[in-house]
Image (spheres, rainbow, N blue to C red):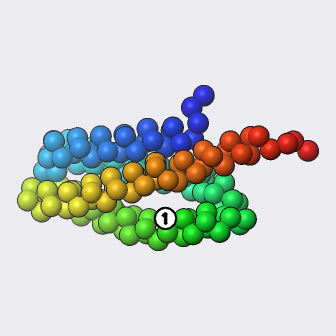
Amino acid sequence: MANLTDKLRREHAAITEALQTVNELGIGTKEGTAVLLGAKHLLLNHLAREDRELYPVLRRAAAARPEVHRMLEHFATEMEAVSATALAFFAKYEHGGEGLAFGSDFGQLMARLAARMSREENRLYLLFDKLEREIGQAPKS
């Protein structure tokens, strides 16, 4: 069975692929707006999984480890900005839009999401996997 961070990485790939498909189809097409709606649901489900399965483990570790606490604070602050950008993008284009503005907004969204996903995968998920290994090796009482 795949572990949580493998699932989260696959979700990142699916979100990115869906958004690229929207860009290829065009936001002015019914297909493009339908895929955009699907991408929004993928992103919201991904965030819910992180909130439900990833962050509780990290918060427990943060209680005893100041470096984990600092990292979580940084990621939480950053996520507020990324989420606001993504939700504004989805709201603006959920019923279509024009190509030039979409292209600019799409580029900004993709840059922010790609940077965030990379940081999650290279820092947060690695930390989570390390903590999971430590918990798994802890003696059972």
Residue 16 versus residue 94: which sits nearer the camera?
A: 16
Viewport quadrant of the C terminus:
top right
Q: Report whether 6 appears left or right of 112.
A: right
Name the residue furthest front.
67
Residue at 57 percent of width and 69 percent of height = 70
Residue at the extreme right = 141
Q: x, y percentage for residue 133?
A: 68, 42
Q: For the N terminus, give its image quadrant.
A: top right
| Mark 1: amino acid | Phe
| Residue positioned 60% across, 57% down in the render | 55
Seen in the picture, residue 94 relative to 78 is either above or below; the reply is above
The residue indicated by pointer 1 is 75
- Using the image as rendered, state which of residue 12 and residue 98 is in the foreground: 12
Frontmost residue, 83 versus 66? 66
Residue 46 position in % (x across, y down): 47, 49
> Can the viewer see residue 58?
yes
Against 138, is 95 above or below? below
Residue occupying the far top of the picture: 1
Q: Quadrant of residue 68?
A: bottom right
Residue at image position (63%, 46%) is 130
Q: Secondary structure at mark 1?
A: helix
Q: How many marks?
A: 1
Q: Residue at x 37, y 40 (%)?
A: 13
Say whether residue 47 is left or right of residue 87: right
Residue 30 in sight here: no
Give the answer, above or below, for where 138 lies relative to 60.
Answer: above
- Residue 31, compared with residue 57, is above or below; it is above
From the viewer's perspective, tell me whether residue 54 is left or right of residue 43: right
x and y percent of residue 8 in the render?
Answer: 49, 43
- Badge 1: how crowded within 10 Å, few (<14), some, or many (20+)? some
Q: Nearer the viewer, residue 75 or 18?
A: 75
